[in-house]
Structure formats: structure tokens, C-alpha cells
Amino acid sequence: MIRAIITGATGMVGEGVLYECLRSDEVEAVLVVSRKPCGYAHPKLKEVIHQDFFDVPPIAEELKGYNACYFCLGVTSVGKDEAEYTRLTYDLAMHFCSVVAEKNPGVTICYVSGAGTSTGEDSRLMWARVKGKTENHIIALPDVRGFAFRPGIIRPTPGLKYAHKAYSYFRWLFPLMRLFSRTAYCSLAQIGRAMIYVSQNDIGKNRLEVADIIYWGDKINQAEKV
């Protein structure tokens, strides 16, 4: 059974992953680590409110006893130079995930990256280099099953709180996009379910592009419950 730590639960992707975990019979416990309450109450949900993700040791003991970490915390690169974006992306993720790995040998870590991330860390796009470096170093952590999730356009789960407002204006486009390409987008549900799947199964790769997220996410068919 999966015991998962989730970060970023007050953002769109993190909330979607949390929602799927709370619904899943494969997940027995969820620890949300956040700067503010996520707004959910559930028998298998516990929250740790912590303001400084660069200072994880004070809550390190709370992170023990978990076999999965779904790292959905992230910031936009817009308006940031490479040094600041690296600090808020690479440094923050590595600090948190390193503590999780130390406390939980063999843990599965799923890091939410993005379509177009540079595995070779050599893209002309600053964000793609930084995300690539973060992916590479999380996957390389000792005694960790590391995965990088690379969604592009994401279809929100209806009824959730933290979906970006812009999605409500072009919801009607999703069926049209699917007519042209089955991998034009993935859903929040598929991201969460794919994380659950790879936590329990060997899929033969560490980086999941949109097509992979759809494929592995659809391996789990969840009944409507929360």
C-alpha cells in the first residue's frame, strides 16, 4: 500500500494528485506538507503546515514512514532570472527530496516537471535547463525510485478549487484538441493515477511524457468517491 507525501496541494496539479490519492484504494495514508491548509478533510489525510521549505530538518521526523513523495510544488519562470529560478526550483526541490529520501530509503519520488524539459540541461530556454537539472538530480538520488512527469496542457478535474481560472475559458477546446491528437493534453486525473501506478510498478523508464502519463494513468480506473 502507498503512503504518500504531497507538496503543492494548494496548486492545481498538487490538488489534483491529492484528490486521486484520497480516492484510491491503493493509497492508505497521505501527508500534505504545505505553507497553508489545503482545505481537505479525510480519514487518511494528515497535514503539516511549514513555512520554509529551505529549512526541512525541523519537520524531518514527520516525514518518516512514507514510501512515495509526489512533489508538485513549483513556480513560474516569468520575471525571474536563472539564479532566482534555480533557487526556487532546483535548490528547493533537492533540499526537500533529499530529506525525504534520507528518512525513507527506497522511496518513490515523482517530480512534476514539464513538456520540453531539457534532459541534457543544454536548452536555450532557461526554465528547461533548470527543470532538466532538477529531474536528473532527483532521479540520481541514492536509494530512490525517481520519476519526472512532463505534462504540457492539462485538463482540470471538474469541481476542484485550485484550477487556473484561464482553463474555464477554453474548456470547450479539449474535445477538439483530442480530435487532432490523442496526446494534445493529459488530465489531472491521469497525472495522479500515473503517479500511483509507477509507485507500485516498474515501467522501464524514469521520464514520463504526455503520452506516457495518459497510458499509465489510464491503467487505473477509479470509482467516483472521495
Image (cartoon, grey):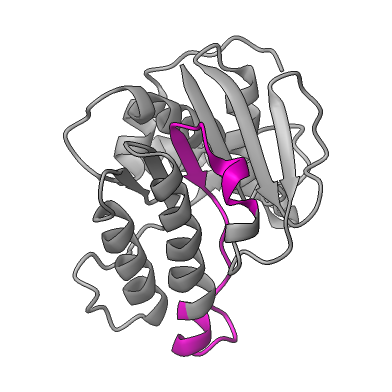
Give percent across and percent down for residue 178. 44, 37
Relative to 58, 153 lies left or right = left
The front one of 62 and 145 is 62
Q: Quadrant of the C terminus?
A: top right
Relative to 51, 20 lies left or right = left
**Number of dots carrying numbers:** 0
Q: Quadrant of residue 189?
A: top right
Q: In which quarter of the image is residue 133?
A: bottom left
At a point 53% along the width and 38% down the height, the residue shown is 64
* Magenta stretch contains residue 117: no
The region drawn magenta spans: 59-86
Above or below, 18 relative to 209: above
Give percent across and percent down for residue 125. 35, 80
At a point 59% along the width and 9% down the height, the residue shown is 223
At a point 45% along the width and 79% down the height, the residue shown is 86
* Magenta stretch contains residue 74: yes
At a point 47% along the width and 27% down the height, the residue shown is 193
Relative to 217, 133 lies left or right = left
Give percent across and percent down for residue 206. 24, 44
Give percent across and percent down for residue 218. 40, 22
Above or below, 202 relative to 96: above
Residue 226 seen by the camera: yes
Residue 181 seen by the camera: no
